Amino acid sequence: MDSRVRELRDQFTSLAYAKILYNGFYFSPEREFNSIVFSQRNVTREVKLAADKGNAFNLYSKQDASMDSLEGFSAMDTTGFIAIQAIQAIRLKKFGPQEIIDGEPLYKA
């Protein structure tokens, strides 16, 4: 895999999937569409996957995650974000039951 192919893979798959999971949309059509299972639904042969050795980093900081330690933070700053999340929550609430009606499991192994 050359650098351009890796760049496209990371742009369209890895980062998009990470954002979907980070935002809590595991049971969503976006996650299903970006999943390996969805992309491989018509594959009938064996697929091999290799994982390279990497480094572990802890990106979580209790101090940075705390709303108490943020200076100048106003709860009103989050109203637009909450409204957008509410719209998506309504859409996702309809997605799961429709999958069940269609006979599709919410999780495909």
Image: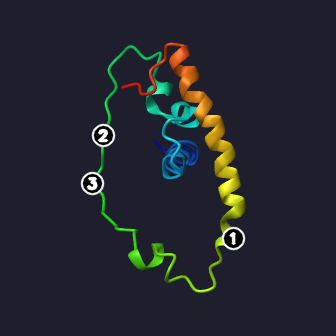
Q: Residue 16: x, y in percent? A: 56, 46
- The residue depicted at 58 percent of the width and 86 percent of the height is 71
Label 3, label 1: how far apart the Cα atoms are: 41 Å
Nearer-the-camera pick, 11 or 28: 28
Label 1, label 2: how far apart the Cα atoms are: 43 Å
Q: Identity of the amino acid at label 1?
A: Asp
Residue 67 left/right relative to 74: left
Q: Which residue is mark 1?
A: 77
Q: Identity of the amino acid at label 3?
A: Lys
Q: Which residue is mark 3?
A: 53
Q: Which residue is mark 2?
A: 50
- The vertical placement of 43 against 1, above or below, is above
Label pair 3/1, CB-CB below 8 angstroms? no
Q: Residue 56: x, y in percent? A: 30, 63
- The vertical placement of 7 against 45, above or below, is below
Secondary structure under the numbered disc 3 in the rendered image: loop
Which of the image's four quarters has the C terminus?
top left
Q: Earlier in the sequence, mark 3 or mark 1?
A: 3
